[in-house]
Image (spheres, rainbow, N blue to C red):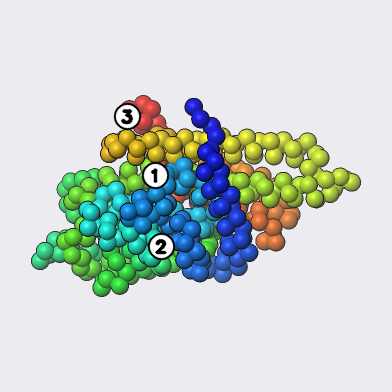
Amino acid sequence: MEFSLTDEQQQLRRTVREFAEGEIAPHVMAWDEGAQFPSELIPKLAEMGFLGVLFPERYGGAGMGYVEYAIIIEELSRVDGSVGIIVAAHNSLCTNHIYKFGSETQKQKYVSPLAQGKMLGCWSLTEPEAGSDASGTRTVAAKRDGCWVLNGAKTFTTNGHHADVCVAMAVTNAGKKHHGISAFIIEKGTPGFRPGKKENKLGLRASDTSEVVFTDCRLPAENLLGDEGEGFINSLQILDGGRISIASLGVGMAQGAYECSVQYAKQRKQFGKAIADFQAIQFKHADMATQIEAARLLTYRAARLADRAVATGDPDARITRESSMAKLYAGEVAVRVANEAVQIHGGYGFIKDYPAEKFYRDVKLCTIGEGTSEIQRLVIARQLLGR
Ligand SMILES: Cc1cc2nc3c(=O)[nH]c(=O)nc-3n(C[C@H](O)[C@H](O)[C@H](O)COP(=O)(O)OP(=O)(O)OC[C@H]3O[C@@H](n4cnc5c(N)ncnc54)[C@H](O)[C@@H]3O)c2cc1C
């Protein structure tokens, strides 16, 4: 077992941290308060290679692996979880779905510009009536005159208003249930396709979470992504990687919350001494740091296994159990750590002048997005018990 990062990975962490502190930190609260999508940051993220982390250089990507991807999401989220989730949805959901299941023509046409950041991606599985039970999808795609015609609406799509390319799931054969849902690639501007209501959120407010609507949206046959009827099954594999994203998001935000509470505890004086000198506060920090480290190890283990699966070239290699465990634990740790960070700040943790308040709001997504904690427990139990 190897518990240390390579020199290159450590250098990558320093590079991302410097970028996040220079380019993101000064704007975090303004973006959050205004629920403002950081459009001006997208070309900078692209320039750094953060929009094509997982994809080979021949498709314009950075050619890195999941461990590097976890480090990038973690370091961006340590400063702003909104940026973390924008990058995550683009990389590991939208672009990865096309990269993993698309034809060579689709990869050339979409993965290359997405990986270079010339296009931004979103991925739509969830619907108002199909959340945890995504197989309850109601959006339909019917074959008409050699085309696919989509009708329905998706909800909670990260990057929905800003994406140039959307990967969406729709029912193509209701009788076949899990094997009757297909994936489609939809370009912005396609008639009948439009982003709908933008959600006004508790946290991650600078990220865009939107409805996307299909009204007689006609797509050429070649926009079917992967085999007909296998879109939902393929999505489960995409979510294996996606859960590494949310685990990394949780680790990063927990680290940010922990660091701001340490800094505060050292300078805040009560009863004539720094509150960091009280054992009650020290124990909180000891627990927070220990839990973050455990979450990070689970996350890196899942990432390492994902890299190994890619390296062995085994298309059926799955990391379902490990990615769900990492996501479950890291998500719940993030919520606990952010809660303690606010507590350590006392009343100042409740106001927006200190970053603890924002971490407290942002982390909650980690126990909900890409499968709630309850669903992760179901997935893990199924893996363990074979039922
Ligand atoms: C900020 C944000 C970004 C998102 N981004 C995307 C995105 O880009 N693309 C996308 O497709 N989706 C996205 N989602 C949707 C997200 O994945 C869903 O919200 C999530 O899967 C839960 O679905 P739901 O909200 O319908 O909750 P529900 O499924 O209605 O769950 C409600 C409650 O019931 C519990 N529950 C449900 N079923 C069971 C069960 N069988 N056993 C025990 N408990 C159960 C849940 O755990 C939860 O506590 C996003 C959501 C948010 C908030």
**For marks 2 and 1 on the same chain, the one whose residue lies earlier in the sequence:** 2
Q: Residue 387 bears which disc, if any? A: 3
Residue 241: assigned label: 1
Q: Few, some or many C-alpha atoms within 10 Å of disc 1 (few <14, some 14-19, many ≥20)?
A: many
Amino acid type of the residue that numbered disc 3 sits on in the rendered structure: Arg
Which of 253 and 127 lies nearest the eye of the viewer?
253
Which mark is nearer the camera, 3 or 2? 2
Q: Secondary structure at mark 3?
A: loop
| Beta carbon of the mark 3 residue lies under 8 A of ligand 1 | no
Question: Which quadrant, please, contains the C terminus?
Answer: top left
Kind of element beneath mark 1:
helix
Mark 3 surroundings: few (<14), some (14-19) or many (≥20) residues within 10 A: few
Q: Nearer the N terminus, badge 1 or badge 3?
A: 1
Q: Amino acid at mark 2?
A: Gly
Q: Are marks 1 and 3 in contact (CB under 8 Å)?
A: no
Residue in the image at 36% along x and 32% along y:
382
Question: Seen from this angle, which residue lies furthest left?
Answer: 145
Please identify the quarter of the rendering in which residue 154 is found.
bottom left
Label 2: few (<14), some or many (≥20) within 10 Å? many
Does any portion of residue 279 appear in the rendered image?
A: yes
User: Which numbered mark, 2 or 1, is in the foreground of this view?
Assistant: 2
Query: Disc 2 designates what residue?
Result: 117
Rendered location of residue 317, percent (x, y): 31, 35
Residue 337 image offset from top left, x and y in percent? 62, 43
Give 341 or 201, whichever is nearer the viewer. 341
Work out how far the residue at label 1 is from the one at label 3, CA to CA, in angstroms.
22 Å
Instruction: Name the residue located 18 percent from the left edge and 65 percent from the top edge.
Output: 220
Judge whether residue 29 can be spotted in this image.
Answer: no
Q: Where residue 309 sits: x, y (%)?
A: 35, 36
**What kind of residue is marked 1?**
Gly
Task: Tell me where residue 156 sits by quadrant.
Answer: bottom left
Image coordinates of residue 296 in percent, x first then y, are: 54, 39
